[in-house]
Amino acid sequence: MNEREIHYLCGLPRSGNTILSTILNQNPNIAATANSIITEIFKDLHSLKNSDVFQNYPDHNSYNNVIKSVIPEYYKNWKEPIIIDRGPWGAPNNLKFLKHYVNPNPKIVILVRDVLEVLASFIEWSDKNYDAFINKLGTNDTEKKCDLLMNPDGLIIKELIAIKHLVDHHPGTYKLVDYNDLVKNPEKIIKEIYKFYGIKLFKHNFKSLKQFEVNGISYDDKVVGANLHTIKTRGINKTKRDIKKILPKSIIKKYANLNVWLPSKES
């Protein structure tokens, strides 16, 4: 079997990750993953290198062999020749690991969306789903929910840091895809993604989608709350929502300028 082709996907939550992966997976040669654990494996391996056991017997060559084998072994039994691994690849340590041990020239698609739209999407989802993880954070107050979602250790801020790191320090490594462009003109955006990855074009069906599944496995949203990764299957349409009616004025003011991928005068 020829060497498997690996590309990467990262971005803000509620920004079309599941829709994009579902579309790409129509191509029988592509497996666009769910949230991957590979960056977590790398993180654990990195911590092992700092352990007393390793420092006592620093076998760097064997350690490097293990790291280099992680991605090939993880996807060893997947049938598709092209893997698009989704994870926080723009985070400084993850990208450093990826470039040093796996691929010095990775190609990363970054999905972005106005941060206020991301927050509004989360709040609207939590209002419709009692068991949403946001509703288990100890408050029913929308402002407090948003502040908790924007916690420095939370997913949104971590992804914003990762995106800014890529944009500021790694030109040529990434391609930005705005959620609104994806839902407005999916065919155009998909063609651009194929060109960026260097993949042969495939005719996709944008009018009839299936719920996300890859390698025979679907999301188990009981972990985070019902329907977090459920998509509309009858075409691609942006949900109409009035941010000013969903988010308090204080939240809009506080988080209005966090679109770190835009030129500074616009963000």
Image (spheres, rainbow, N blue to C red):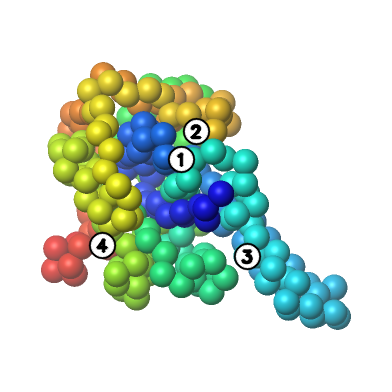
> CB of mark 1 within 8 Å of CB of mark 2?
yes
| Amino acid at the residue labelled 2 | Val
Dot 2 or dot 3, earlier in sequence: 3
Q: How many residues crowd around disc 2 within 10 Å: few (fewer than 14), some, or many (20 or more)?
A: some
Tag 3 residue: 68
Residue 102: quarter of image: bottom right
Tag 1 residue: 31
Dot 3 or dot 4, earlier in sequence: 3
What is the x, y in percent for residue 168? Answer: 31, 73
Spatial CA distance of label 3 from label 4 is 31 Å
Residue mark closest to the camera, 3 vs 4: 3
Q: Secondary structure at mark 3?
A: helix
At x 60%, y 54%, the residue is 72
Q: Classify the position of the C terminus by image quarter.
A: bottom left
Q: Is residue 240 left or right of residue 158?
A: left
Above or below residue 32? Residue 64 is below
Dot 4 or dot 2, earlier in sequence: 2
What is the x, y in percent for residue 51? Answer: 78, 72
Q: Is residue 124 left or right of residue 32?
A: left
Q: Is residue 109 visible?
A: yes
| Amino acid at the residue labelled 4 | Trp
At x 47%, y 54%, the residue is 6
At x 34%, y 73%, the residue is 170
- Residue 214: image tag: 2
Dot 4 or dot 1, earlier in sequence: 1
Dot 3 or dot 1, earlier in sequence: 1
Spatial CA distance of label 1 from label 2 is 7 Å
Tag 4 residue: 261
Query: 21 or 202: nearer the eye?
Result: 202
Q: Secondary structure at mark 4?
A: loop
> CB of mark 3 within 8 Å of CB of mark 4?
no
